[in-house]
Amino acid sequence: MVEKTPTVYDVAEMAGVSIATVSRYFRNPDAVRESTRERVGQVVRDLGYVPSGSARGLAARRTGTVGVCFPSFDDVDRIDARRLGAGPPVRVRVDTDAHQDTGSDLYIAEVVRGTEIEAWRHGFAVMIAVPRGAAAHNVVEGLAGRVDGLVTLARAIDPDQLAHISRRIPVVMVAGPRDGDVYDHVTANNHGGMVALTDHLITEHRLTRLEFVGGPEDSPDAQVRFEGFTEAMLLAGLGVPERPIARSDFTRVGGRETGRLLLAERRLEGIDGLVCANDQSALGILDELTAAGVRVPQDLAVTGFDGIEASNVSTPRLSTVRQPMVELGRLAVAQLLRRLAEPMTEPSTRVLGVEVLLRDSCGAHATSTP
Amino acid sequence: MVEKTPTVYDVAEMAGVSIATVSRYFRNPDAVRESTRERVGQVVRDLGYVPSGSARGLAARRTGTVGVCFPSFDDVDRIDARRLGAGPPVRVRVDTDAHQDTGSDLYIAEVVRGTEIEAWRHGFAVMIAVPRGAAAHNVVEGLAGRVDGLVTLARAIDPDQLAHISRRIPVVMVAGPRDGDVYDHVTANNHGGMVALTDHLITEHRLTRLEFVGGPEDSPDAQVRFEGFTEAMLLAGLGVPERPIARSDFTRVGGRETGRLLLAERRLEGIDGLVCANDQSALGILDELTAAGVRVPQDLAVTGFDGIEASNVSTPRLSTVRQPMVELGRLAVAQLLRRLAEPMTEPSTRVLGVEVLLRDSCGAHATSTP
DNA sequence: CACCGAAATGTATGCGCATACAGTCGAAAC
DNA sequence: GTTTCGACTGTATGCGCATACATTTCGGTG
């Protein structure tokens, strides 16, 4: 099905033109006479010719591709263990577990979608890579060599390596604060969002004994959200916990573990609100609270962060802070392309606005008000 | 921040070796003496050298990249209208609408995730592209020229163009039945799943007046599911509708439109079950039914297809058929790489098993059974 | 009919790397 | 001391295209 791949030379010869004309046929058709264009087009179709991106990239010194790197939360080993294509053709079962998790990270998916949209608008393709496992370094290096610029989520790439590749191509970091680096940054107003949400709990719902469920230790976003939480507590004159009451790993499964732990150790007694560092954790905790008969929000308020779709359809619906995830991705690519055009401008930091979404899980007021 | 990008020649000169040795340092380090390796490595670090993927791809005649193409369901114009980064830093609002849709297609996201995982396992990168708009042809051609093989979802690429590029690189089609073509195919058992689900409604829930809500006219999956539906009806000796009672576009928003239409025209009277071509449509219809006070499943059973996460947390939870979405993506890439290694084997068709998930929306039996 | 400028096309070169092949070097075997 | 062999390194070439520049063609003009 795949024949010996023809090149410009083949097309040029068959069409009786030079390779320059074949090249123009693709890159600047208006510079080719109508009759010639038709002749070349015919040969292109006959031969099944598709220009080589590698050769083009080499000659033109640009690839027309942006790279996107993000951390992996999925357990590849577990997925790997499942044999491909195994199982009967149709299995029927009663599914009573409302809480299984597909393991996908909606937040990342949305950001990636944003990058694709903006790249498409500018005629760029998107190359994605997840630096996981032992070959993480190679994955990143391969990506860096094949793209004109790189968008990376925080924590995806080893800082040393990031510094290395940023000498070759511009880098835009998403969802990570500037940390002595000179990359462009695009992030959401995590701090302000968390202050507003916490303040709402305190002011509107009169909750005073709040605790914070943190994220991964190395997540700057999780850290900033915690700081927003403590700031709001402080402003309200409330006691501020030294640290999160627990940490989860940003997954729903992890959230459920955390929930079980908190319940088992009775660490929720005396608490009237649980502010979580992200939605998935909050949903996992919600799963366990519901299972244990704890009523949310009557017995305990719970809030999330991110505004993923699942938070909108959970029971109870989760109050949260929506990040403009698609916009984060779009803006990152937009900034990347701007820098490609204007390499010498100052490193920029864009902070996108967030939206506090008051739904059912945060307290009686929101629900009892018709 | 981005300096003049160094090449192998620069590294070779500074390290006092030939370019062949520099190349070996990256491709076959064991063939380089320890002391030399260290010297080259030092220069690589000093210079910030990253090998050019274009040059490498050209010389090696392979890119180490697989392409993934999928159709776009998102309304880019609408997204585009939203100004990037506009709006206040923090907005607070009560969010009473449980049914907004982010517009993302979870099904596609999962398949893409599967492709990435399998590609990663083999040291390949993934390049994604969505052929939308006037430049769709260019998008696909650019992708085809930059990758070693292409995975495409059904309906993503114009068939003529697909035939054209398949002369250059192998193509694996996901979720589309073979249709006179010679590509490799990977799909799920749509037919069997729908037969089993419909049969369940008929046999277990004694539903007899079922209607089918179709998908896009040109979706082969939707077509096959409709055929599964009619087959089960036929087998049960029930009257078979000529055509779907309505068609939706596979989005939740579209499903809601369909739901409103069916309600407004009172076309649901006398019906006791609505079998939908996919989850998103079903969820959209569910939204409207709930809003209109129609009880599901008591007044009307509703089922979906796909098994996206949202179907698992809706109210009521949606009975559906789970496709192994991640596996579809993985298997597609696995097959692609197999063909790259063995180009002359027969075109293959793999049909993955599905799982009928009986939850709450399909009838009293599933819920009333403790 | 010669002439002119613009349009169209051709020529020549280099992009940065992989790799086949040739060459060098040192240590072990003779 | 010579030979042999393997480990290591260097030389030369081509991958397929874009593009600067040179050249030809074409449709008028004087």
Image (cartoon, coloured by chain):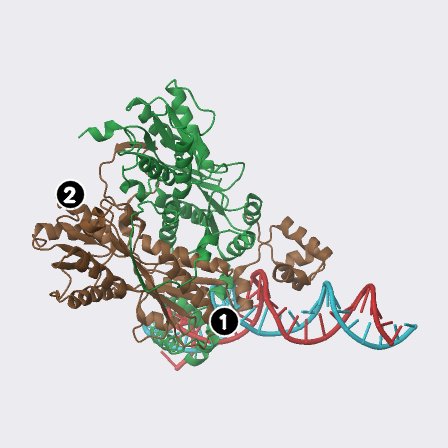
Chain colours: A green, B brown, C red, D cyan
Q: Which residue is mark 1?
A: B341
Residue B307 lies, with reference to residue B222, above or below; the image says: above
Residue A135 lies, with reference to residue A194, above or below; the image says: below
Q: Which residue is mark 2?
A: B291
Most distant residue in the top direction: A237
- Name the kind of residue labelled 2 in the image: Ala
Q: Find out whether the residues at labels 2 and 1 contact each other: C-beta distance under 8 Å.
A: no
- Which image quarter is the N terminus of chain B in? top right
Q: Position of residue B46 (x, y in %)?
A: 64, 49
Q: For mark 2, give the secondary structure.
A: helix
Q: Residue at x 55, y 63 (%)?
A: B56
Residue A274 lies, with reference to residue B286, above or below; the image says: above
In front of the other: label 2 or label 1? 2
Say left or right for B291 vs B11.
Answer: left
Quadrant housing residue A126: bottom left
Task: Identify which residue, D1 or B81, lies in the foreground.
Answer: D1
Chain letter belonging to callout 2? B
Q: Position of residue D25 (x, y in %)?
A: 40, 78
Chain letter belonging to callout 1? B
Residue A366 in view in this figure: yes
Q: Residues within 10 Å of mark 2 (few under 14, many from 20)?
A: few
The CA distance from mark 2 to mark 1 is 55 Å
Residue A35 lies, with reference to residue B43, above or below; the image says: below
Residue B253 in view in this figure: no
Quadrant housing residue B219: bottom left
Q: Residues within 10 Å of mark 1 (few under 14, many from 20)?
A: few
Q: For residue B96, which numbered disc appears in the image?
A: none
Task: Identify which residue, A178 or A260, lies in the foreground.
Answer: A260
- Picture mark count: 2
Task: Identify which residue, A115 or B123, lies in the foreground.
Answer: B123
Q: Position of residue A352 (x, y in %)?
A: 37, 37
